[in-house]
C-alpha cells in the first residue's frame, strides 16, 4: 500500500509520465508497477492513455487539453518542432533542415502532433505547411507548470544561445 501511495504521488507530481519513465524514476520492476497501476486505475485514482507505442499516465480528473500537450512535449524532437512552430508556420522540409532531421523522421512526428490536435497541416502544392493549433502561451504555461525541469532546461538553452551570439559579434 505504501508503494502504491508513492506511485500515485509521483504521477500527481508529474502528470503524463510514461510507464517506462515511472518505472525507471521509482526503481520499480515492470510487473510490480503494472500491478499497482492496475489497482490505482480500478480505484479511479489514475488513468492511462496509449499513444503510439507509449503509455502515458495521469491522475484522475486531469484536464484533456493539458493531456495532449504533455504527450506532445514528451519527446525531445517534438519539443524542438513545437518551439520552431512558435515562430510561425513552416513546411516539413524547412523543419527537417532547421533541426537536422530526415524527412521521414519529421513526417512521423508531425503526424503524431496532428493526431494529438496540437498542429494543423495544410497542403500547398507538393508541400505541407504546419502551424500550431494552440496559443504558444498555453504551451509555455503547461511546460512551466507541469515540467519545471524542462522549463529550466529551455531557459538554460536560451542563455547559452544568447551568450554564443554575443561572442560572435
Image: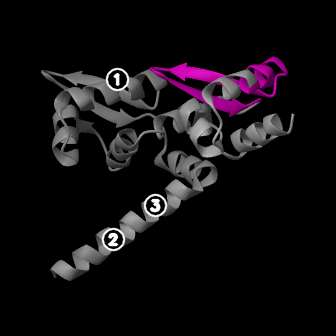
**Residue at image coords 76%, 30%:** 61
**Residue at image coords 47%, 35%:** 72
Query: Which residue corresponds to mark 2?
Result: 160
> Residue 159, position in %: x, y?
38, 72
First of labels 1, 2 by sequence position: 1
Classify mark 3: helix, strand or loop.
helix
Vertical order, 163 against 34 (above or below):
below
| Residue at the extreme left of the image, as rendered | 126
**Residue at image coords 23%, 21%:** 123
| Quarter of the image where one finds residue 130 | top left
Classify mark 2: helix, strand or loop.
helix
Query: Which residue corresponds to mark 1?
Result: 111
> Residue 128, position in %: x, y?
22, 26
Asked whether the beta carbons under mark 1 and mark 2 sit within 8 Å of each other, the answer is no
For the N terminus, the image quarter is: top right
Magenta span: 36-60
Q: Distance between the residues labelled 1 and 2?
A: 31 Å
Query: Which residue corresponds to mark 3?
Result: 153
Residue 90 has which mark?
none
Badge 2 density bin: few <14, some 14–19, many ≥20, Cα 10 Å: few
Amino acid at each position: 500500500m505504501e508503494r502504491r501511495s508513492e506511485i500515485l504521488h509521483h504521477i500527481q507530481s508529474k502528470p503524463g509520465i510514461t510507464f517506462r519513465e515511472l518505472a525507471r524514476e521509482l526503481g520499480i520492476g515492470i510487473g510490480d508497477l503494472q500491478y499497482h497501476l492496475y489497482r490505482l486505475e480500478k480505484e479511479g485514482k489514475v488513468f492511462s492513455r496509449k499513444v503510439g507505442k507509449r503509455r502515458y499516465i495521469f491522475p484522475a480528473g486531469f484536464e484533456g487539453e493539458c493531456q495532449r500537450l504533455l504527450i506532445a512535449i514528451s519527446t525531445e524532437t517534438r519539443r524542438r518542432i513545437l518551439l520552431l512552430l512558435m515562430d510561425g508556420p513552416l513546411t516539413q522540409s524547412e523543419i527537417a533542415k532547421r533541426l537536422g532531421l530526415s524527412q521521414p523522421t519529421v513526417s512521423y512526428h508531425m503526424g503524431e502532433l496532428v493526431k494529438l490536435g496540437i498542429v494543423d497541416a495544410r497542403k500547398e502544392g507538393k508541400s505541407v505547411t504546419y502551424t500550431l493549433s494552440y496559443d504558444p502561451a498555453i504551451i509555455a504555461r503547461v511546460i512551466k507548470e507541469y515540467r519545471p525541469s524542462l522549463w529550466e532546461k529551455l531557459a538554460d538553452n536560451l542563455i547559452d544561445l544568447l551568450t554564443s551570439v554575443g561572442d560572435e559579434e
